[in-house]
Amino acid sequence: MSCGEPHETDCSEVLDHLYELLDGEMPDGDCTKFEVHFEECSPCLEMYGLEQAVKKLVKRCCGSDDVPSDLRSKVMGRIDLIRAGHPVPDEDVTVGGPESPDRE
């Protein structure tokens, strides 16, 4: 998505890193750069607002659900692989994997 207008920070860069901003995982300097972009670009600001609303809704509806520790470990392991630049296996990350008796 792009609004078609030139910006110091391209719309695609903003949207590629939107969840880092929403999750508070972005360095302050980048946050400022993105906030300036939102002041100039209403489509990106709208997308930010939409994703922020979805995140709040999911937290409100699902925030109290406990995540099984083995699922959390598998997901965190995949995140570590991705951050390290390693290929990620195509195996299922759900609890018990594909052979689990509770899966259909």
Image (cartoon, grey):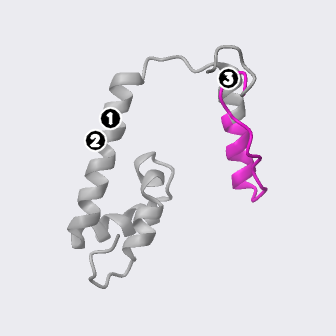
Residue receiving disc 3: 95
Above or below: residue 4 compared with residue 19: below
Alpha carbon distance from label 2 to label 1: 5 Å
Give the residue type at disc 2.
Ala
Task: Look at discs 1 and 3 and give the one toward the viewer.
Answer: 3
Is residue 85 toward the left or the right of residue 68 in the image?
Answer: right
The magenta region covers 75-97
Q: Give percent across and percent down for residue 7.
A: 32, 81
Viewer-side residue, 62 vs 83: 62
For mark 2, does the 10 Å Cα neighbourhood hold few (<14), some (14 to 19), or many (20 or more) residues? few
- Tell me, yes or no, whether the highlighted magenta stretch contains residue 86: yes
Task: Look at discs 2 and 3 and give the one toward the viewer.
Answer: 3
Q: Give percent across and percent down for residue 54.
A: 32, 40
In the drawing, what numbered circle is on residue 56?
1
Mark closest to the chain's N terminus, 1 or 3? 1
Q: Give percent across and percent down for residue 91.
A: 74, 39
- Tell me, yes or no, whether the highlighted magenta stretch contains residue 96: yes
Is residue 50 toward the left or the right of residue 100 in the image?
Answer: left
Is residue 52 toward the left or the right of residue 29 in the image?
Answer: left
Quadrant the C terminus occupies = top right
Residue receiving disc 2: 53
Give the residue type at disc 3.
Val
Query: Of all residues shown, which one is farthest toward the bottom?
Result: 6
Mark closest to the chain's N terminus, 2 or 3? 2
Above or below: residue 20 compared with residue 92: below
Q: Give percent across and percent down for residue 83.
A: 69, 54
Is residue 78 toward the left or the right of residue 27 in the image?
Answer: right
Name the element at disc 1: helix
Kindly indicate whether the residue at mark 1 contacts the one at mark 2 (C-beta within 8 angstroms): yes
